[in-house]
Amino acid sequence: GSLAAMREVLFSLFFLFCTFNLFVSSISVARKPQTIKKWTIQMVGYSPMKNDDYVAVSMEAPTGYIVGYEPIANADRVHHMLLYGCTRPYAERGFWRGESTCGGGGAHILYAWARNAPNLELPKGVGFAIGDSSGESGIKYLVLQVHYAAPFAGNVRDYSGITLKVAAEEPANLAAVYLLVSGQPIPPGQPAFQNNMSCTYPSKTVLHPFAFRTHTHKMGRLVSAFYKRNSQWTLVGRRNPQWPQLFEDIPRPLEIHQNDFIAGSCRFDSSGEKESTPMGSMGSNEMCNFYMMVYYKASDENPFPYGAYCSQGYEPHAFDDYPKEGTELLPARPELEHHAHQSSVPFGVIEEAKFSSIGSVHLGQVSGLSFDPSIISSSSIVERESGIKIHSTGRMS
């Protein structure tokens, strides 16, 4: 009897042990929410002094991983912004004029903005390592370069910039921006001139492209990029550069391996030009850029310790079989071109008249003016009593 009772006790204990383990294994342990801080780098009240005015500001890079970008800018004020990660900034004083960005060491493009592009959120588990987290890349400083196309009208100051979302925890994958760039000038009178760029990817670290951005000036009509392995071309992306110049998501998984041939092409319309147009940073020049945002495993070797650039030139025959979709125009999207429009009228406010009264009405501190073209009598009164002519644009003279 005692032996049977002992067996029953042991069986009961075994049953309870198994039940407890099953219960524990079924409990889902909630992960600690990711810690994200926001850091902003921006202009400090600058007013451009000339056409194609380039300026830059710098700040020490916080330690962490950039997982999102929130631009603070408008295309009517700013032509474009570029954010660099630098070992050292070009100047120690925190602000300088001119096109220089990084001083010595690495120069890494972290983000680019133009034509009213929206915010950018990186995929889950991906981030740009900066500060003490950047390791071999040595990104100790952030430098924001801002290009103003023209001076403002009146006494107006600019505070454009970028807010960074920085996570403290290391992600499984690290991000980089691989820039394809061409320096080939554009001949005049060509309605469909192709400007090509290419290189061979040298590293053993596998790249995963997940977003892309295109950039040209006014003559650009299409920018595309592919990579080639075993005679097979794979599309990375293509986009009209006259649309908002955002980083567009790549909807399919891609992998770039060592010795893959990477190629890009820009289509330009120079039919209205009388002279050759060089590549350059001025508004009268052109640009042919394809920004490829990629990630790689954090445990793999950093393929770009000093920056990621594809500008070795190209072999003409390498483009003999370049995919046709990489040169054909995309369907028109007038709503995107409208959103991306950069006004030819200088941004700002011009004081063209001062007055303290309108007729017998004495004016105190005027907090604002409103114009409605359907109310003729109001504008007529102002014009008659003050001698100020109101134009259809709402400006007064």
Image (tube, rainbow, N blue to C red):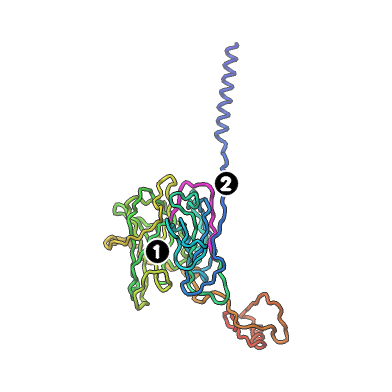
Left or right: 235 as drawn, with respect to 247: left
Residue 161 in magenta stretch? yes
Q: Residue furthest left?
A: 317
Instruction: Please provide percent x and percent y for residue 146.
Output: 49, 66
Is disc 1 in contact with disc 2, using a CB cutoff of under 8 Å? no
Instruction: Please provide percent x and percent y for residue 331.
Output: 42, 67
Q: Which of 312 and 75 is in front in this view?
A: 312
Residue named by callout 1: 289
Residue 203 in magenta stretch? no
Residue lying at 50% horizontally and 52% vertically, measured from the top left? 131
Q: Is mark 1 on a helix, strand or loop?
A: strand
- The stretch in magenta equals 160-176
What secondary structure prevails in the magenta region? strand
Residue lying at 38% horizontally and 48% vertically, measured from the top left? 205
Q: Earlier in the sequence, mark 1 or mark 2?
A: 2
Instruction: Please provide percent x and percent y for residue 311.
Output: 35, 61
Instruction: Please provide percent x and percent y for residue 158.
Output: 55, 69
Is there any visible trace of residue 195 in the rendered image? yes
Q: What element carries label 2?
A: loop
* Quadrant the C terminus occupies: bottom right
Is there any visible trace of residue 336 in the rendered image? no
User: Within the image, what quadrant is residue 369 found in?
Assistant: bottom right
Q: In this view, does 287 lie above or below 127?
A: below
Q: Which of 85 and 284 is in front in this view?
A: 85
Residue lying at 46% horizontally and 55% vertically, measured from the top left? 87
- Residue 33 is tagged as 2
Which amino acid type corresponds to the residue marked 1 in the rendered image?
A: Asn
Which amino acid type corresponds to the residue marked 2 in the rendered image?
A: Pro
Q: Which residue lies furthest to the top in this view?
A: 1
- Residue 315 is tagged as none
